[in-house]
Amino acid sequence: MKKSIQRRSFLEFLGKGALSISVTPTLLASKFYTAIPENKTLPFVKGIKPSKKDELKLARGLNFHIIARWGDSITPEETFGFNNDFTAFIPLDDSNPDEGILWVNHEYIDPFFVSSYVGGVEKTKEQVETEQYNVGGSFIHIRKKKSGKWEMIKDAPLNRRISGQTAIPFNWDEPIAGKKEAIGTLGNCSGGVTPWGTILTCEENYDQFYGERNHKTGEIKASRTDLGWSKYYEYPPEHYGWVVEVDPKTGAAQKHVALGRCAHECATVKELEDGRLVVYTGDDAVNQCLYKFIGSKPGSLSEGTLYVANVALSRWTPLDYENSPALQKFFKSQTEVLIRLREAAKLVGGSPLDRPEDIEIDPINGNVLVSLTNNSTVKNYYGSILKIEEENNDHEALRFKSEVYLAGGEETGFACPDNMAFDLAGNLWFTSDMSGSLMNKEPYTAFKNNGLFFVPREGEQAGQVIQIASAPTDAELTGPWFAPDGKTLFLSVQHPGEYSPSMDQLTSHWPDGGEEIPKPAVVAIQGRLLEEIQGL
């Protein structure tokens, strides 16, 4: 598809509808939203070219500084975890955008760096426990200094860790695999925020930690990337793969069974006028599905109906055991349906998609964007972003229209879209997720390292895809989240140097340079350009 057609389609998609903002992973404090004034002259943004350099490279007019990196002390007893992903900033005071709590997911570990495990022998229990500690998430109290830079307040009372060793109850009436609580949260990829300011962190590739059960034979099969934790801790696989809610003020957590069990990438929340919640979530695996939960009671994430998208028929199909003969034939209860969500979704006609990852709701017109990262089984190597327009712009609707409006490829300049965010002017930002094993190799040679991209909504560049940042070697940029005043973009730099052959042959030394080992870190991106493109 030619660039001009891509751009026109994007502009038609954006539209000029009525403002409709709720608490979402990009806009927490909606009162800070500001449309660009009619008489405002927007800058011509000169993006960067793809880069293979081992650096966080930014477009001119932007700068960054590090807020926290793996291993940093956050309290006398706790340290910042590994492979930071989703971030969310919760202001302590709605009137002050310059101080609050930053939540950061810790998705998975690299044993090579975290526990000094290099293979060939069994891991020790101590190594496993070190790895368990480094997943989950971190709460850190941060504030902006007079210099404009953000700092973590070390040893603050609100600093805390949630890890693979934390006991977390299930929000459900029935036990899950015989237990009312799970030990740990893991595989935490993207997430969301509730209207009451708690975090939804999503357990994605859970099978690499404790395997997956074959429900016909009862046998637990290890993942090809199995970490070997089951040798010392035989936790049921069914305890993972959930959306987990965490309270930033208390650290209290619960796993929401009603949202189903799969490789959740995110949980994007829309609050309806009566206080009920709609939650969109995708299953990040090839040929898996897109889901929507519609609550039946205000503020509840346990009472309601979970639906799966049938894109061919443009409808949301309920995963409701009581009213589905197809589900009753293969499952014994609604609980079993939710545990074996992938099987259930296919039985009722859920559409297989190209790795549905992040989901965002357009703050201007309410359309739902879904990153479809790629799918090698159908030779879709570059991925796309799907647009869903709910019937009558009603997020409770069971009918929708959908179309691919922005496809990856060399003509558009990006591949494998992943995490997305809207800034305060409604511009779209997204990151890429090319596998480290294929980065700078065919079919991704032209794109070089992973990046951060920006699509202007207004001005002469409206609809163009502009690369704003390039990641260090082997790394992925994740978790973009704007501060309430739009003047800072929080961003994770995940797994730099992941494909290092040995400590003597490190592929990355980011962020410290020299001969230092690479460390995942969360950065704050700021600068004149960030403010100008939002009309601030």
Image (spheres, rainbow, N blue to C red):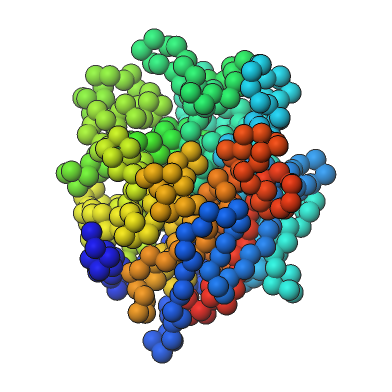
Residue 179 visible in the displayed image? no
The correct choice, above or below, for 501 with respect to 26 in the image is above
Q: Position of residue 53 (x, y in %)?
A: 57, 55
Q: Residue 318, located in which quarter of the rendered image?
A: top left
Q: Residue at x 41, y 90 (%)?
A: 39
Q: Is residue 124 left or right of 238 when viewed as pictured? A: right
Residue at the outermost top position: 217
Q: Is residue 190 left or right of 372 when viewed as pictured? A: right
Q: Is residue 20 left or right of 117 when viewed as pictured? A: left
Q: Position of residue 326 (x, y in %)?
A: 22, 25
Q: Residue at x 45, y 75 (%)?
A: 45
Q: Position of residue 78 (x, y in %)?
A: 76, 41
Residue 382 visible in the displayed image? yes
Q: Nearer the viewer, residue 316 or 462?
A: 462
The correct choice, above or below, for 462 with respect to 278 in the image is below
Residue at the outermost left position: 313
Q: Residue at x 22, y 34 (%)?
A: 349
Residue at the outermost right position: 76
Q: Nearer the viewer, residue 482 or 378?
A: 378
The correct choice, above or below, for 506 with respect to 384 in the image is above
Q: Nearer the viewer, residue 456 or 197?
A: 456
User: Can you say which quadrant of the picture contains the N terminus?
Assistant: bottom left
Q: Residue at x 74, y 23 (%)?
A: 126
Counting every numbered tag in the picture gives 0
Q: Position of residue 489 (x, y in %)?
A: 56, 64
Q: Residue 311, located in which quarter of the rendered image?
A: top left
